Structure formats: C-alpha cells, structure tokens
Amino acid sequence: MATTATATAQRKVKFVITRKDSPDAASYTEEFEVPYRPNMNVISALMEIQRNPVKADGAKTAPVCWESNCLEEVCGACSMVINGKPRQACSSLVDKLEQPIRLEPMSTFPVVRDLVINRERMFNALKKVKAWIPIDGTYDLGPGPRMAESKRQWAYELSKCMTCGVCLEACPNVNDRNSFIGPASISQVRLFNAHPTGEMNAHERLEALMEEGGIEGCGNSQNCVRSCPKGIPLTTSIAAMNRDTTKHMFKQWLGM
Amino acid sequence: MAGNSYLPRKIHSLLGVIPLGLFIVEHALTNYSAYEGGAEGFSKSIDFLNSVPLVFWLELFVIWLPILFHGVYGLYIAYQSNLNSGRFSYGRNWAFTMQRITGVITFIFIAWHFYETRFQVTLGNVKHEDLGQHMNDILSNPVALTAYIIGVVAAMFHFANGLWAFLVSWGITVGPRAQKVSSNICMVIFVILSVLFLLSLVAFRGDEFSSEAAAALSAVSFG
Ligand code: SF4
Ligand code: FES
C-alpha cells in the first residue's frame, strides 16, 4: 500500500495550457506538472493547479481560469479544446489522453480569460429562432395535442443539446467572415417544430432560419455530427430544415 | 455582405446543377465524339451544336451568365470558410476543403480555357471547324496539357461533389443513408466524366487533329 502510494504520488501529468489574461491580451502557453491521481479528469487537474499555481519550471503564476458546473457532461460549460479536439473537460479522463495534455480555449468564441469563453452567440441564436413553445396567455389553454411515441423517441435525442458549442468550434463556416448561425440552433428548430404545440409556430422558426445569419451558411463539412458529445444527428437536422425552408420558400412565392 | 444570402446561396447551388451540370455533360459528350469518331465525329458534333436555334442566347443564359454568377459568388463562399481538415481529418470535411480548392482551380481554368477557345472564335482568330486542330496545337505543349488534366479533373470533382451538396442543401437527401448512397453515386459520376474528358484530351493530341490532317479533312467536308 505504502509503496504504491508513493509511486503514484511521484507520477506527474504534464499539461500545456494556452492562457490569456484579458479579452484583448495576447495569448501565451504555460506548462504544468500535476501529481497523478487514479481516475483524474481534466477538471480535477485544473483544480490542482488552482490549489498550487506553480509552473513546471517551479515559478509561481496566476491560477488558470476555466468554467464548469455539472461535472457530468450535461451543462456544456466546461467545453475546451483538448489535444486539438473540442470536448468537455469534465468527461475527459487523463488516463485516456496523450501527454502532454494540451488545453486551449474554443477560440471560435470570444475568449474571456484563459479557458473561459463567452457562448452568448449561441443563446442569441436560440432567441432568434424562437427555440421555445409559446403557451403563455391570459387564460388556461388546456392540454395540448399529444406527441406520437415514435416521434418522441427521436425528438428526445435532439433535446439532449447542452449548448456546449463544440459543434460551432468544429465547423469551418462558423467564423468572423461568415454569418452562419451554427448547427446547434438549427437542430433546435427541428426539435420545437416537431412538438405538436410548437408546430403551430413552425413558420416563425423557419423564417428566422431563412434570414441572413441563418441556415444558408452551412457548407456540409459534417464536422458537427462527428464532434457532438451527445451524438445528436445534426446533419440530419440541418438537411431536414433545408427541406422545410425550401418548401416554405415555395409556399411564400405561391402565396400559400 | 449586406442583405439576405439565403436565396443567393440556394441559387448558387442550383445553378451548379441546372444548367451548368447539364452543360458539363453536353461538353463531355461532344468532346468524347473526338475520341469515338475522330476529327469527323467531332466536327459533326460541332456542326450539330451550331445548328441549334438561338444558339447565342442559349450560350448566354444557359452557360455564360450562370457561370459568371456561380464562379464569382463561389469565390466569396470559399473566402468565407476556415478550412480545418488538418484538425478534423474526416472524409466529408476533406470533400468540403477540396470543393473550395477545386472551385478556385476550376474558376481559373475556365477563364483561361474560355479565352483560348470560345473567345478566339468570337475574335475570328479560330474558325469553328478548326477547333480540333486548335486544341491539338494547345495540347502539344506539355505544360498546357498538364494544366488541362488538372483543370478537367478538378472541375469534375467540383461538379460531382457539388451535386451531392446540392441534394443536401435543397433538402432532397436528408438521412445519413440517403447521403451515403448519393455520395457513392456522385463519385461514380466524377470518375465517368473525368474519363470522358481525359479520353478526349488523348484524342485531340492524336495525329488526326494535327494541322496537316485537319487541312486535308476540311478540304473534304467543308471544301
Ligand atoms: S448540438 Fe451537440 S455539440 Fe452542438 S451545442 Fe448541442 S450538445 Fe454541443
Ligand atoms: S461541467 Fe458540465 S459539461 Fe462539464
């Protein structure tokens, strides 16, 4: 027991972290060596750096900032680029990562500090496409229509989206030169348009996708569906919304 | 860019298939007639095309204006992408990257090819019946031949892969199965059209299209 404890205590995990002191500051990298513990994940390593903010060369530094909340891959707050791929830090086990482990912010989004990013554009996109079901009123509307079980099953998969931003980070068309809204909110339009009550406002969501900064920027690289941690069929959602917006366009032309 | 790009993007995608895709097929078959029927077969095909009524207006509205819009707007679309197939090395992402690279190559190739052939006909420097021989002259230069091979293969990839993307962007192929099947079909189209054009390049390099043979032939059929 005692010997294995010292053996694990001596093992170190190497990290190379991209840092940034403020939104406008230049970024730089720092190296850290964190004592290994069995089953540790990237968040527990970051917590260790927070407790003891010393670089690999022994010099003290400011603790690394990151965001996390649920620690079980359902809130999406801890998304960052780990060894080149965007993913959740809380579900990234150190044992399964190649070392040194490289942590970078998802720089498709504005970087606030170190690994902390601002995902506001995703929440704005959800507002733009009205990703909710309007049932507020001055009197009780009574129960809505039921959803078929067969539909509920695939719609449930779409509802797992945690607005983590990984699909936007992976997309070559989400950038400053392109107004593409990004895969996540397009899939949410499909979800809310599939709902029997949400369907009553389907045209509003489709029209939002047909405005500038909507669905049109998709270039079919399909990185999103390969990257989504929740396995959401994003490219199917995008193609389905391509179909629905195309139909809607013809209906508008024909005045139907 | 100001305004709403929903419609321009959709039209850009459509124009690549109709009419430009149809023109590519026509062009491939006309050229292939040089391989199959030699100089005579090729000049018959050209005669047929020139006999089509309103040929100038057809060229203008079915070929030149769509190409201009598709090409210029396409360059803008390419500019709007951050190519990342190094980081996300997936098949479809490579196709995405290649679609943009081949698009730029095709744009340059078509501009050059148009200048050398159709535009020279307009200027009166080359006659329709001498086009085969004219191609022979161009392709006898190894640099030009290499450029033609690259241009033709790039253009055919761009068309075939663009057809796949058109089916997605217009919401025709929705599920992964449909997109997989259409991807296989489009790659077969890529190979077939590339082979047709490459064979016509082989034919144009043949002796039959060299200056003397063409002179003899035109003396017979157009004399
Ligand atoms: S669709 Fe997937 S990758 Fe995109 S934000 Fe939602 S959970 Fe994250
Ligand atoms: S902390 Fe919630 S997803 Fe990682």
Image: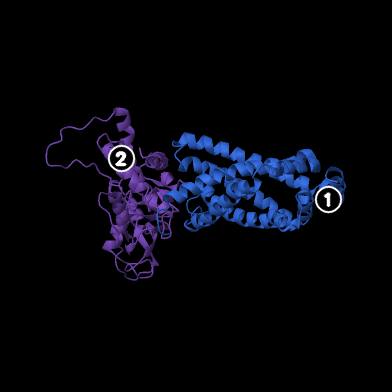
Chain colours: A purple, B blue
- The one nearer the camera, A38 or A91, is A91
- The one nearer the camera, A161 or B63, is B63
Residue lying at 36% horizontally and 40% vertically, measured from the top left: A255
Gap between marks 2 and 1, in whole Å?
64 Å
SS at mark 2 in the image = helix
- The one nearer the camera, A224 or B14, is B14
Q: Give the labeled residue for mark 1.
A: B210
* Marks 2 and 1 belong to one chain: no
Residue lying at 58% horizontally and 45% vertically, measured from the top left: B20
Q: Which residue, as the protein is rendered here, is positioned at the far left?
A: A139
Q: Image quarter for residue B147?
A: bottom right
For residue A202, which numbered disc appears in the image? 2
The residue carrying pointer 2 sits among few (fewer than 14), some (14 to 19) or many (20 or more) residues within 10 Å by Cα, namely many
Question: Which amino acid, by three-letter code, is at mark 2?
Answer: Ala
Q: Could you tell me residue A10's position as x and y percent? A: 36, 58
Q: Image quarter for residue B116?
A: bottom right
Q: Could you tell me residue B152's position as x and y percent? A: 66, 49
Q: Is residue B83 left or right of residue A86?
A: right
Question: Which amino acid, by three-letter code, is at mark 1?
Answer: Ser
Q: Chain of mark 2?
A: A
For residue A72, which numbered disc appears in the image? none
Q: Chain of mark 1?
A: B
Name the quadrant of the C terminus of chain A. top left
Q: Could you tell me residue A170's position as x and y percent? A: 42, 52
Q: Which residue, as the protein is rendered here, is positioned at the far front?
A: B54
Q: Could you tell me residue A249's position as x and y percent? A: 39, 42
The residue carrying pointer 1 sits among few (fewer than 14), some (14 to 19) or many (20 or more) residues within 10 Å by Cα, namely some
Q: Is mark 1 within 8 Å of ligand 1?
A: no
- The one nearer the camera, A167 or A211, is A211
* Residue A77 appears in the picture as rendered: no
